[in-house]
Image (cartoon, rainbow, N blue to C red):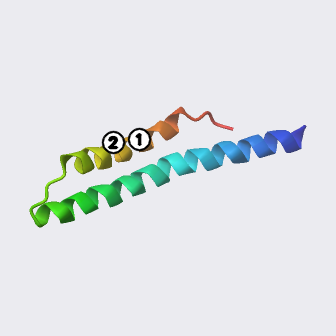
Amino acid sequence: MSGSSTARANALIAVKMALRFGLPLIGLVVFGRAIVLSVGGDIEHGQFALGVLLILAGFTSKLVPRP
């Protein structure tokens, strides 16, 4: 039984770390790309919004239960 609970705990930790760090990093890349494009005059409001939403989505890691 302990092997099963250890595997579940490891899976929850992996999901939590992916949500906590992965989504905000992707959001920063998207947001940064939108900033670079806007300097050239091509303002993409959708990319700004997507970047901010991905950064805020990092808070969903709080919804993953503790192992």
Seen at 51% across and 46% down, the residue is: 19
At label 1, the amino acid type is Ala
Q: Label 1: state its secondary structure.
A: helix
Quadrant for the N terminus in the image: top right
Whether residue 6 sits left or right of residue 67 in the image: it is right
Which residue corresponds to the image point at 44% horizontal and 50% vertical from the top-left? 23
Disc 1, disc 2: CB below 8 Å? yes
Report the residue marked by disc 1.
Answer: 57
Residue at image coords 81%, 39%: 5
Provide the secondary structure element on which disc 2 rests. Answer: helix
Task: Find residue 47 and report its horizontal and vertical position in percent.
Answer: 26, 50
Q: Amino acid at mark 2?
A: Leu
Which of the 4 image quadrants contains residue 65?
top right
Dot 2 alpha-carbon crowd within 10 angstroms: few under 14, some 14 to 19, many 20 or more: some
Quadrant of the rendering where the C terminus is positioned: top right
Q: Residue 22 location in percent, x, y?
A: 48, 54
Is 67 left or right of 6, judged from the image as shown? Answer: left
Distance from disc 1 to disc 2, alpha carbons, whole Å, reads: 6 Å
Q: Position of residue 6 (x, y in %)?
A: 80, 44
Q: Which mark is residue 53?
A: 2
22 is higher (above) or lower (below) than 41:
above
